[in-house]
């Protein structure tokens, strides 16, 4: 009721007719004249004297300058008369104008006010912070001519993917390479936010495709606008856009990428306005209204989504000095630490209203995967000072090994999924990233288990290679089973597709970096050749619907992550270790490299509040 009574009152001045406005203006000017006339022409009184009688030269000088009291009083009177006459003249002139002229004037004034407000509310300059030590951001020549030839081929594939998008899908989120037009999915809402451009920038940069990089930068400067009425996935926008923009900023030093990343991050913060602080899956960039996916268990948020914000948000606090980002992700960590976990496992669903787990389904693949990855990478990114993250990772991996990791009858190590109290002997392509994760986390493992986890990584890499090798196209299916005599093979038709995913190649690269076993480069080259043979079309690269068919149909989508991840990991696989060394860089889950923060004595804003 209070709001209903207040609205007409506050809105009434803007609804006055023009003639009423000018009458008010005349009354106001007459009132001002009357007040000042009374002040100057009424008989002297004590207050008048108190103000205008000079008590000391200092006061006179402060108020009127060195000219003294009399001349200043005269000039003040003259100024009032002049202002009054000018106001009356303006009012008369306005009343003589036609309605059209007045409307045009009002519109001009409105536009000016809007522009002034825009300037006032525009991007505030960010505080200068020391740039982390940047090592190995270009070149990476492998030396060996044969390896260099393979690397050049990967670069050529990237150029084909980019040029096709540039020609047929520019500004759209993704590309339909068969139809040769733009494409988008519901994770980006209904907006054209150039997801492929943002996702591909750092890959272009490290490959030395600088003209293409400049094209992307120009589009971002001129067109990337987050004040759109679009409902987007907080997770996807964070890993692809914020991750991509931050990586482009660190690699190139171009300020525009940092500014855009911060503008977008501010738009994501309303998603955290829930009773628990666990963010909604989706948020409207314009209104800030959030909600969860309709299919998620009982309106739950998803572990891999709200658990995959830490890397980017820590960097946002580092770059802006705003503690909110760091505090949001640390709050999530603290909340999870207090909760009971069935068998030590983290279920994939958590209700943001009640703070209770949803369906007891645990996976290291889709819905769970990058939560575990970001625990490890939070520790690495902190220069190994975030021991809480490392301990949480170690505990989680121990539970996963006890309950989810098994060996098939044929001797293949796989990671199953825990559903309603039993293990489903199925592994997804997404889960294949875990081989690289185990290798990356081997150093620093408790109880001298480094060798064990490196071996576990190698076994997962072998299993995932088998899932590729046992298909007709030598490309891996979306999911594969380990039962009924079938191993590392997809059974259902809707699990036989390959959509240019990177996870298997990602594991090959990590295993190569830690072991330099040549088989990983060989396996990567097999995958690259298969992609070039079966997924390449004249308008780019497309996913295929059945990897067991010698004549597959295309899905007609060139995913943005193909340029961000798949081609980047292949390029790194055939580069020297000097390109983006793992001691200095940590890759987010979309393969965007962010520098390790050697903070030393520097404390992140807000970090004290979390202790």
Image: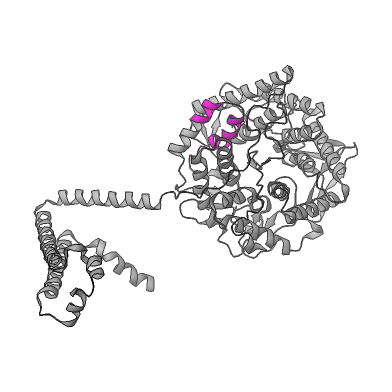
| Left or right: 356 in relation to 413 | left
Q: Say if 194 sits above or below 51 in the image.
A: above
Q: Residue furthest front?
A: 57
Residue 178 visible in image = no
Quarter of the figure with residue 554: top right
Counting the numbered discs, the total is: 0
Residue at the spot 50% in from the left edge and 35% down from the top edge: 172
Q: Say if 332 sits above or below 441 in the image.
A: below
| Depth check, front residue: 308 or 366 | 308
Figure coloring: one colour
Give x and y (percent) for residue 270: 52, 57
Residue 315 visible in image = yes
Give x and y (percent) for residue 383: 70, 47
Magenta region: which residues?
192-214
| Depth check, front residue: 569 or 5 | 569
Q: Quadrant location of the N terminus?
A: bottom left
Give x and y (percent) for residue 401: 84, 49
Residue at the spot 66% in from the left edge and 33% down from the top edge: 136
Give x and y (percent) for residue 240: 59, 41
| Left or right: 331 in relation to 504 | left
Q: Would you say the magenta stretch is mainly helix, strand or loop?
A: helix
Residue at the spot 58% in from the left edge and 24% down from the top edge: 159
| Depth check, front residue: 443 or 330 | 443
| Left or right: 244 in relation to 345 | left
Q: Residue furthest bottom?
A: 46
Q: Say if 535 sits above or below 62 in the image.
A: above
Residue 124 painted magenta:
no
Quarter of the figure with residue 589: top right
Q: Quadrant location of the C terminus?
A: bottom right
| Depth check, front residue: 68 or 7 | 68
Q: Say if 346 sits above or below 192 in the image.
A: below
């Amino acid at each position: 009721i209070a709001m209903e009574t207040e609205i007409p009152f506050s809105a009434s001045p803007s609804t006055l007719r023009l003639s009423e406005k000018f009458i008010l203006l005349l009354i106001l000017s007459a009132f001002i004249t009357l007040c000042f006339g009374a002040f100057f022409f009424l008989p002297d009184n004590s207050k008048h004297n108190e103000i205008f009688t000079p008590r000391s030269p200092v006061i006179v000088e402060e108020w009127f300058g060195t000219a003294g009291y009399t001349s200043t009083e005269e000039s003040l009177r003259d100024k009032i008369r002049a202002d009054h006459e000018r106001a009356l003249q303006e009012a008369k002139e306005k009343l003589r104008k036609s309605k059209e002229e007045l409307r045009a004037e009002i519109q001009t004034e409105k536009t000016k006010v809007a522009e002034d407000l825009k300037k006032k509310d525009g991007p505030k300059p960010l505080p200068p912070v020391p740039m982390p030590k940047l090592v190995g951001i270009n070149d990476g020549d492998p030396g060996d001519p044969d390896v260099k030839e393979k690397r050049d081929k990967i670069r050529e594939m990237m150029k084909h993917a980019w040029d096709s998008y540039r020609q047929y899908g520019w500004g759209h989120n993704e590309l339909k390479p068969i139809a040769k037009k733009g494409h988008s999915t519901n994770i980006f809402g209904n907006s054209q936010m150039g997801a492929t451009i943002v996702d591909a920038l750092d890959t272009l940069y490290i490959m030395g495709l600088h003209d293409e990089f400049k094209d992307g930068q120009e589009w971002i400067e001129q067109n990337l606008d987050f004040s759109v009425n679009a409902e987007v996935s907080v997770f996807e926008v964070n890993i692809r856009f914020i991750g991509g923009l931050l990586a482009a900023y660190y690699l190139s030093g171009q300020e525009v990428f940092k500014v855009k990343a911060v503008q977008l991050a501010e738009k994501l913060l309303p998603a955290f306005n829930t009773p628990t602080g666990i963010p909604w899956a989706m948020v409207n960039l314009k209104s800030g209204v959030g909600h969860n996916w309709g299919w998620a268990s009982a309106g739950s948020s998803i572990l891999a989504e709200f658990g995959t914000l830490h890397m980017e948000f820590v960097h946002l606090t580092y770059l802006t000095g705003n503690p909110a980002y760091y505090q949001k992700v640390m709050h999530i960590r603290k909340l999870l630490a207090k909760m009971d976990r069935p068998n030590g496992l983290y279920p994939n669903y958590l209700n943001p209203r009640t703070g209770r787990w949803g369906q007891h389904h645990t996976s290291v693949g889709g819905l769970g995967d990058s939560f575990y990855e970001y625990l490890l990478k939070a520790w690495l990114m902190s220069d190994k000072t975030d021991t809480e993250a490392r301990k949480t990772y170690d505990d989680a991996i121990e539970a996963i090994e006890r309950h989810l990791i098994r060996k098939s009858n044929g001797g293949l190590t796989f990671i199953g999924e825990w559903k309603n109290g039993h293990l489903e002997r199925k592994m997804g392509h997404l889960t294949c990233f875990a081989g690289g994760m185990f290798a990356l986390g081997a150093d620093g493992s408790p109880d001298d288990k480094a060798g064990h986890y490196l071996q576990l990584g190698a076994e997962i890499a072998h299993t995932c290679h088998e899932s590729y090798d046992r298909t007709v196209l030598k490309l891996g299916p979306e999911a594969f089973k380990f039962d009924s005599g079938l191993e590392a093979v997809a059974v259902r038709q809707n699990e036989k597709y390959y959509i240019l995913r990177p996870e298997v190649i990602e594991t090959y690269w990590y295993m190569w970096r830690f072991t330099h076993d040549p088989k990983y480069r060989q396996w990567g080259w097999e995958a690259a050749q298969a992609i070039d043979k079966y997924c390449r079309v004249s308008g780019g690269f497309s996913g295929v619907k059945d990897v067991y068919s010698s004549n597959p149909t295309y899905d007609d989508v060139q995913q943005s992550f193909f340029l961000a991840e798949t081609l980047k990991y292949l390029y790194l696989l055939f580069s020297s270790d000097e390109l983006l060394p793992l001691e200095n860089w940590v890759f987010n889950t979309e393969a965007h490299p962010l520098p390790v923060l050697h903070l030393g004595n520097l404390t992140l804003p807000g970090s004290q509040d979390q202790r």
